[in-house]
Amino acid sequence: MTGLKGTVVYGPQATTWGPSSLREEDALQTSPSTVGKILHLWSQLFLFVTLASPSVAATADPTWQVGASVTHSSGDYGTGSTTTITYVPITIRRLFDQGDISLVIPYLSITGNCGVTLLSGTPNNTGGTCPTTTITTSRGRQVTRTQQTRTTESGLGDMLLRGRYYVLDGTASVPTVALIGRVKFPTADSARGLGTGRFDETLGMELTQRLPANFVAFADTGYTFIGRVEGAGLRNQWYYDLGLGYYFTKALLGSLYYEEWRAVVQGFQNPRDLLFALNWTVTDAWRLNSALQIGLSDGAPDYGITFGANYRF
């Protein structure tokens, strides 16, 4: 997808596959200065949700959710050369009555010609934020050069901090509405093509509407401010998705989404795809999720497969 639904993070909104805005069904889902920014933003999001949720103070037992997933995707993204990506995020999530806060710590492996870069967990054709190497010339000068050959690079990806606040409880005729915010921290090694080395910030909205006969509708939209990379020409990115889900049983939800997000480089095709997702509430504590992504444009992967599990306590 672009992402990141479940506690999988992969996709334009990089949120969660499933009823993300439906709280009662919410089953599925460096340097000192950088550390300081992370702690500061975490504290601000925590304070925001705490103050906005009067019932939090009265909650005797805090609710947490820990999840992990594996996504494997492959495609040429319009570059003419196949890029394969394995994305393995661990998500730590604090749940409140009126929202939640999540920290995502991903492991990442990319095999390709460096034309594709993950932005907030979503693969995008960036035109080449390629790994570099530094050599020493015969005259003793150090020169940094771009590696244009096909390589495999692995390591820590960009960490994500996400917050969500419910502004409206849904009814039979009114959707549940949630506001979301996300910050991408540049913890991935940009010199190896694992990220851009810049902060990204996202603001968005999620809508969920219960429908008759066990159906539920989803709609998400948002806007990401992409960190400036000199010479890359990356532009800010909007995204949206529309989905329809069906509860086969009370514990098993199947969903189909159409997703599109703006190409970060002008002249490239917007990524568009279809996402099929299954969320299974095994017990009150355990939830499993899986998804199949099928690309509809050159900007999206040809396919992506995800499996994940979450534990709530």
Image (spheres, grey):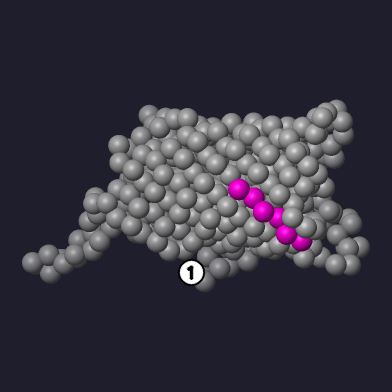
Q: Amino acid type of disc 1?
A: Thr
Instruction: Looking at this view, name the residue that lies furthest to the right.
Output: 58
Pick the front one: 234 or 23: 23
**Horizontal side, residue 18 vs residue 297: left or right:** right
Q: Looking at the image, which is closer to me, 313 or 196? A: 313
Q: Residues within 10 Å of mark 1 (few under 14, many from 20)?
A: few
In percent of width and height, residue 157 lies at 48, 59
Please tell me which residue is depicted at 63% across the width and 34% down the height of the picture.
256
On the image, the x and y values in percent for residue 162 come to 65, 53
285 to 52, vertically: above or below: below
Q: Quadrant of residue 17?
A: top right
Judged left or right of residue 8, residue 112 is left
Residue at screen point 33% across, 57% down? 152
- Asked if residue 6 is positioned above or below residue 168 in the image, the reply reads below
Q: Is residue 225 visible?
A: no
How many numbered circles are shown? 1
Does the image show residue 115?
Answer: yes
Query: Which residue was labeled with disc 1?
Result: 30
Residue at 24% of width from left, 50% of height from top? 148
In which quadrant of the rendered image does the C terminus lie?
bottom right
Q: Looking at the image, which residue is at 73% across and 45% down?
A: 252
Q: Quadrant of the N terminus?
A: top right
Point out residue 139 in the picture as x, y percentages from the top left corner.
9, 67
Percent across and percent down for residue 210 are 80, 33
Position of residue 207 relative to residue 65, above or below, is above
* Secondary-structure class at tag 1: loop
**Is residue 287 shown in magenta?**
yes
Q: Which residues are magenta?
A: 285-290
Give the prevailing secondary structure in the magenta stretch: strand
